[in-house]
Image (spheres, rainbow, N blue to C red):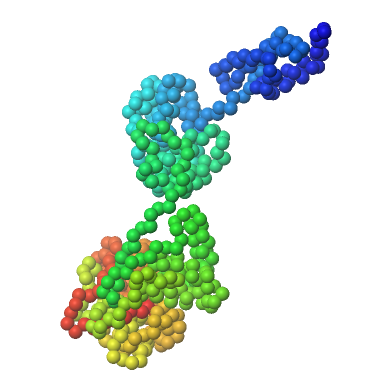
Amino acid sequence: MALLRPSQGLLNLSRSLLSIFPEHLRPGCSRQLALTPSWAVQTTVAESCSNGYAMPRDPVTVGVASAGMPTILESIASGCLGGNLDEKALSSLLSLPSPVTALSILNKVTSSQDEVRNVSAFVSTAVRNAQPTPGKQELESALALMEQARHLDEKAIRELQGKSVQAACNALGILLQQQEGSVRNPSAYVCRNLQNDRRGPEDLPAAGAPYQMSMAPPRSAPPPPPVAQPNFAAGGMLPVARPLIEISPGGLEALDELLAKWRPAIDQKAWQSLMALDSHAVDILQELDQKADQIRSPSAYVQRAVGNAKAGHAPGRPRTGMHPPPPAPMGSMIPGAPPPVNLPFQAGGQGFAPVEDSPEVGNLFSDQVQAWSPSAYSRSANGNQGQANLISAPNEAFFGCENVISLLDDDAKRALDALPEELGMVSASLDEKALSALHELPPGSAVHIVRNLRKQEAQVTNASAWVCKAVGNMKRPPPPSAGAPEFAKRARV
């Protein structure tokens, strides 16, 4: 049977198919590949088919784009040095265990490029002298180059600088090993790597080992041991419970939503007392959110919960193994009691602030009087230091209850109203920490400290430190002295 010669149209169709799918050649055909130095492949096809169709003798040359793309690190190296770096030096630079070390070397070269005569020799020497793992200096140098090249924004730079050196190098190294153009937002990519990187010491790459591209799976951190805090009323220590919301991306997001939801509904005073707590603040907000339909006044609820938390009653869950402290005997002393008459105020000593300048409002003490009167206590404390109308076994519901303000007369209310005015006179010279410390005290005590600061303003060089020291002295229990009451309870109005 005679061989049929294909038409010109069929030959053109065959060439088109071969140019699109060079790997899918029919059995019986041979293919020769000639690689060129560029990112392209020259495919020469010379067929000798056994199915009756004779392919043309002229070879068909096809250009195929290479799948290999340069990494971000290679792109930065090419952009910084261009053709000044030979292939051997570039290969040694890219073969370093950590891309962060390579990036720091590039930054050194670019910063002193005018002084370097032989860039390739400089890079080769730096590669030989490089440490197996990058340190803080290498990280800062790499971040400077990333910021200069506009690969990372200021927020991502701050996030990396705020983490440990190993975590930051790991997150940045993974970005540098990605292909150029595959990451749309490098800054967000790095921040996500920082959130996902929870590796332990056993997961870190060994010295000299090649840099790993994959992230280690997230692992939960071991629970921290409870931190003991003093409980002067019981004479012992109470462990502080861990927060209900774990510090993780989801937990932080939920906490942010909780804070944004309830901040407008809580007044400034209640919010400041809530923020002064530790992990119990999260518990209080969670319980408030769960009981939102049953609570009429969120501010009053928060104030009462803060008072209960400071008394040792955790909101929402009982403390395992803990019992309420037994009634303390008459004669013990806790922080917040008015100072003895002969105890002077000293900025750097153990004394308390004097009480002769303003009525003491909020410190209500248990003694022999059967009925209590906050207003009478305020007037009596103002007229005679340490002597006041005292109460017997105040109801625990009083702690933080905003209804107490309605029980105060005009003199006691003026003591509360004087605090903002006094703070306004010195707020310009106090930082946020000092102002927050003053708000933790009863209004009368804060007024005492502010007025003493104004009296000694010429001798005080650091007003904020002076105030923090005075607040600390106010909170300390006084040394035992003869005639001191054996027990006192403290409440804040």
Camera-side residue: 448 or 173?
173
In the image, residue 210 sits, relative to residue 167, either above or below, namely above
Name the quadrant containing residue 42: top right
Q: Nearer the viewer, residue 366 or 322?
A: 322
Of residues 94 and 374, the one nearer the viewer is 94
Q: Position of residue 16 (x, y in %)?
A: 73, 20
Q: Residue at x 46, y 61 (%)?
A: 245
Q: Residue at x 40, y 79 (%)?
A: 399
Residue 264 picture location, percent across and down: 52, 68
Q: State the image quarter where residue 413 is shown.
A: bottom left
Vertical side of 491 occupied by 379: above or below: below
Horizontal and vertical percent position of residue 417: 41, 79
Left or right of 106, for residue 290? right
Residue depicted at 48% across the width and 72% down the height: 267
> In front here: 356 or 139?
139
Q: Is residue 158 visible?
A: no
Is 293 above or below relative to 383? above
In the image as oriented, which residue stretches furthest toward the bottom?
Answer: 370
Q: Can you give x and y, in whole percent of width and height, for residue 446 in the image? A: 34, 74
| Vertical placement of residue 126 versus 275, above or below | above
The quarter of the rendered structure image containing the C terminus is bottom left
Which of the image's four quarters has the N terminus? top right
Residue drawn at (55%, 38%) of the image: 183
Residue at far front of view: 1
